[in-house]
Amino acid sequence: MAGFKTRALSAVVLVAILGTALFFGGYYLWALMFFSSIVGFFEFLRAMREPEDRGSMKPDILEALGYTGIAAVYMVILFGWLIWAFYVLILLLISLMIAYVLQFPRFPTSKMMQVFFGVIYVGVMLSFVYLTRMGEQGLKLVWLIFIASWICDTCAYLSGMALGRHKLTPVLSPKKSVEGAIGGVIGAALVGLIYGIIIELGAAAWVPAVICGVGAVISQFGDLTASAIKRNHEIKDYGTLIPGHGGILDRFDSVIITAPIVYILSQVFL
């Protein structure tokens, strides 16, 4: 019971902080997403380390370049220089290559690739929450990200409990079922449809339904990817920042991959 209360209280606080940031947008949301990206990147890097090295918080040169890259990406999107985010990533990759060569043979090749992947996976993809919110009709569109991820997650859980018979990924996540996955997509699409009817988006209500449905499919792969990484590196949770939920990557694993999809589909349809 104590564990449930902790989890519920954390969820209320998280929703209050995130909901306020999404509503007001601007610097508040930018700062929250930047903080989440930095913490999420730290959690990712710690998971990649050997078990005996996970207690250290001191970044090496490659990791420091990764943090710098995320900060640079957030700075350029704050000023609306989106094309510069691409330039930042190219410069980051070149910087990682230079550091890798100058420090050879200190780092394995995989470390350079892990850092670059982590910057994109956590930093760049999570920034699309901010980009969606600050775009045209952003206040209306940004909620589609969370309908496609968190509503899908809830509906998948309920559908799986009631109807689950066939394992979706028996080795990776034995509790997830095909029926649950389908229920999650249908649930997210229906909520998206209702949301589209209630909120005027300048398009037919089926548009947000399709965006949420497609986003829900993708979100489940985000969830499973995060789970696969944890299993490969033998960790239970990425962090402890959110009591009862784990770390940023534990709570936002599906949002990370859903945010850019919703942003892209919104640009296409709306």
Image (cartoon, helix red, strand yellow):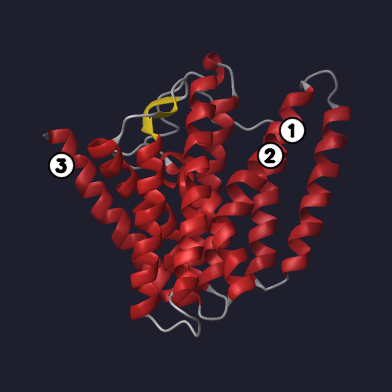
The residue labelled by disc 1 is 113
Identity of the residue drawn at 45% across and 32% down: 238
The tally of labels here is: 3
Q: Residues within 10 Å of mark 3 (few under 14, many from 20)?
A: few
Residue toward you, 141 or 7: 141
Write down the quadrant of residue 104 in the picture. Answer: top right
The residue labelled by disc 3 is 5
Q: Is residue 47 left or right of residue 268?
A: left
Q: Residues within 10 Å of mark 1 (few under 14, many from 20)?
A: some
Identity of the residue drawn at 78% across and 58% down: 86
The residues bearing labels 1 and 3 have C-alpha atoms spaced at a distance of 40 Å
The quadrant of the picture occupied by the C terminus is bottom right
Q: Amino acid at mark 3?
A: Lys
The residue labelled by disc 2 is 117
**x%, y% of residue 19?**
35, 65
Look at the numbered disc 1 and give the secondary structure of its residue: helix
Residue 26 visible at all:
yes
Task: Decide: is 39 above or below 204.
Answer: above
The quadrant of the picture occupied by the N terminus is top left
Task: Decide: is 230 above or below 29.
Answer: above
Residue toward you, 109 or 258: 258
For marks 3 and 2, the one nearer the N-term is 3
The residues bearing labels 2 and 1 have C-alpha atoms spaced at a distance of 6 Å
Identity of the residue drawn at 45% across and 76% down: 139
**x%, y% of residue 51?**
52, 16
**x%, y% of residue 211?**
51, 64
Look at the numbered disc 3 and give the secondary structure of its residue: helix
Residue 241 visible at all:
no
Q: Amino acid at mark 2?
A: Phe
Q: Amino acid at mark 1?
A: Met
